[in-house]
Image (cartoon, helix red, strand yellow):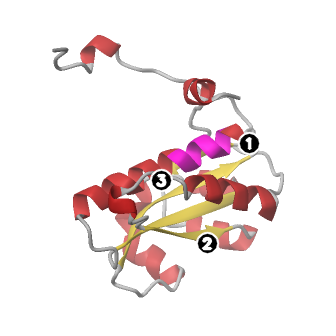
C-alpha cells in the first residue's frame, strides 16, 4: 500500500477479533513510529507495551472505552519524556506525529487501531497501575489495536471549511 492510499483508507477501529499479535509485528509498528519527525530530533516519546490479556483488562478499568482496550490484541501507553528539554509545545506536537505514525503503521500491516485520549482523566490511576512513578514522564494517551472486527467510517467537514486563507 502506498503512503497516500494508507492515509486515505486508515480509520479508527474500535472492535477487535480475539487474534494474538506477534512480537515481530508489534516491534515493526514501533520501529515505524520511531521514525516520526520531532523538533530537534528529540524523539520525546516512551512507550509501555501492554499485551497480556490480564494487563489489558486491568488497564481498561481506567477508561469509559474499556471494551476497546480489553479486547485489543495490544495497547501502547504513550508518554512524553520531559528529560528531553527542547520545547514543551514542540515536544507535544512530536507526540502527535508519533501517534499518527503508529496508527498508519498499524493500518499498513493490516491491523486496525484507535487513539484513546479519554484515559487521561485517570492519569494517576494509570500511572499507579503501570508503576510509573517518574515525574519526568507525562501520559499522553493510548493506542489500542488488533485485528479489526468492524469496518471504520469517516466523516469530515468540507476542505474549504479548514482553509483560512490561500495566498
Of callouts 3 and 1, the N-terminal one: 3
Q: Is residue 50 magenta?
A: no
Mark 2 to mark 1 CA distance (whole Å): 27 Å
Q: Is residue 60 above or below residue 144?
A: below
Q: Which residue is mark 3?
A: 98
Q: Residues within 10 Å of mark 3 (few under 14, many from 20)?
A: many
Quarter of the picture holding the N terminus? top right
Q: Is residue 105 magenta?
A: yes
Q: Which residues are magenta?
A: 101-107
Q: Which residue is mark 1?
A: 109
**Going 41% across and 20% down the picture, which residue do you hit?**
156
Residue 44 in sight in this render: yes
Query: Under tag 2, what secondary structure?
Result: helix
Of callouts 3 and 2, the N-terminal one: 2
- Work out which residue is located at the far front of the displayed protein and give it: 40
Magenta stretch: dominant SS? helix
Q: Is residue 38 above or below residue 2?
A: below
Q: Nearer the viewer, mark 3 or mark 2?
A: 3
In the image, taking residue 145 as reference, residue 99 lies left or right, namely left
Query: Under tag 3, what secondary structure?
Result: helix
Looking at the rendering, which quadrant does residue 83 occupy?
Answer: bottom left
Task: Give how far across and how far down residue 37 sits, in percent.
Answer: 43, 51
Task: Give how far across and how far down residue 92 sits, in percent.
Answer: 32, 58
Quarter of the picture holding the C terminus? top left
Looking at the rendering, which quadrant does residue 82 occupy?
Answer: bottom left
**Going 47% across and 74% down the picture, which residue do you hit?**
126
Mark 3 to mark 2 CA distance (whole Å): 25 Å
**Going 49% across and 45% down the picture, which residue do you hit?**
100
In the image, taking residue 132 as reference, residue 69 lies left or right, namely right
Residue 67 in sight in this render: no
Q: Which residue is mark 2?
A: 58
Amino acid at each position: 500500500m502506498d503512503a497516500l492510499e494508507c492515509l486515505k483508507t486508515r480509520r479508527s477501529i474500535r472492535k477487535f477479533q480475539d487474534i494474538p499479535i506477534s512480537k515481530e509485528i508489534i516491534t515493526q509498528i514501533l520501529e515505524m513510529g520511531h521514525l516520526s519527525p520531532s523538533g530537534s530530533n528529540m524523539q520525546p516519546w516512551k512507550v509501555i507495551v501492554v499485551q497480556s490479556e490480564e494487563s489489558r483488562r486491568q488497564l481498561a478499568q481506567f477508561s469509559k472505552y474499556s471494551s476497546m482496550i480489553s479486547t485489543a490484541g495490544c495497547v501502547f501507553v504513550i508518554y512524553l519524556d520531559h528529560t528531553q528539554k527542547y520545547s514543551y509545545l514542540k515536544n507535544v506536537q512530536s507526540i502527535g506525529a508519533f501517534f499518527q505514525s503508529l496508527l498508519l503503521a498499524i493500518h499498513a500491516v493490516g491491523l486496525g487501531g484507535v487513539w484513546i485520549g479519554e484515559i487521561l482523566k485517570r492519569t494517576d490511576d494509570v500511572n499507579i497501575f503501570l508503576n510509573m512513578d517518574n515525574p519526568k514522564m507525562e501520559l499522553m494517551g493510548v493506542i489500542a489495536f488488533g485485528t479489526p472486527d468492524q469496518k471504520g467510517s469517516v466523516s469530515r467537514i468540507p476542505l474549504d471549511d479548514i482553509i483560512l486563507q490561500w495566498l
